[in-house]
Amino acid sequence: MARAWVSLGGNIGRDAAAKRAAIAEALRRLDTGKVRVIARSGDYRTPPWGPVAQDWFVNACAEIETELRPRELLDLLLGIEHAMGRVRNERWGPRLIDMDILAYEAVTVESPDLTLPHPRMMDRAFVLVPLAEISPDLLIGETSIAHALARLDSSGIERLR
């Protein structure tokens, strides 16, 4: 079994409850068979990110144990997104659910469709805030999640009750 960390987010839904329900459903679908969710952050309301004007997001992270190799895990995540109705129309645009592998043990992967650790995670407070809740000491290279988060502006990110 290998350990991996996954981010989840979405901003399509009439309210926070609908956006949170999509994350919960994605985690339920993930936690079957060859993957087990062992830790889950709270849900966070986060400002939209990127060049596209859009609604606010709900983001979360999970730590998992898996028998799947990184590429197989990516295929599972993409399959869950598709089954839940994710349509990829616009990069960084609105989405019902988005799931990314952030890290997979100490494995490094560089391919056209998968880079591990996630190449932009250490610059995104909306990823690091929930990740720091469950794995503050996780090292990416030689930098802990908590240390990377301390260097970012996390204003506007709010833990939902």
Image (spheres, grey):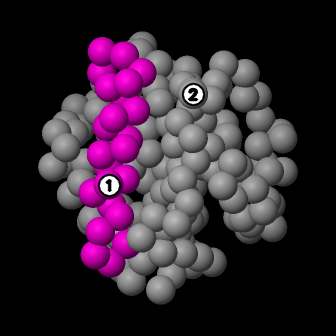
Q: Amino acid at mark 2?
A: Arg
Q: Which residue range is magenta in the image? A: 13-35
* Residue 128 belongs to magenta span: no
Q: Is residue 133 left or right of residue 31?
A: right
- Residue 22 lies, with reference to residue 16, above or below; the image says below
Give the dominant element type of the magenta stretch: helix, strand or loop.
Answer: helix
Task: Report the residue at 72% width, 21% height from top.
Answer: 155
Q: Where does residue 58 sit, x and y in percent of width and height?
A: 47, 30
Give the quarter of the image for residue 129.
top right
Mark 1 — residue? 28
Q: Where does residue 8 sit, x and y in percent of width and height?
A: 44, 45
Badge 1 crowding class, 10 Å Cα cut-off, few under 14, some 14 to 19, many 20 or more, is few
Q: In this view of the protein, which residue sits in the foreground, 59 or 49?
A: 59
Q: Where does residue 160 sit, x and y in percent of width and height?
A: 57, 27
Callout 2: helix, strand or loop?
loop
Task: Report the residue at 55% width, 20% height from top.
Answer: 47
Q: Do residues under tags 2 and 1 come within 8 Å of each other at their CB atoms?
A: no
Q: Amino acid at mark 1?
A: Arg
- Residue 30 lies, with reference to residue 126, above or below; the image says below
Task: Report the residue at 37% width, 53% height from top.
Answer: 27
Q: Earlier in the sequence, mark 2 or mark 1?
A: 1
Mark 2 — residue? 161
* The C terminus: image quadrant: top right
Callout 1: helix, strand or loop?
helix
Q: Is residue 16 left or right of residue 134?
A: left
Q: Where does residue 146 sit, x and y in percent of width and height?
A: 80, 51
State the separation of the CA atoms marked 2 and 1.
20 Å
- Residue 82 lies, with reference to residue 116, above or below; the image says above
Q: Is residue 93 visible?
A: no
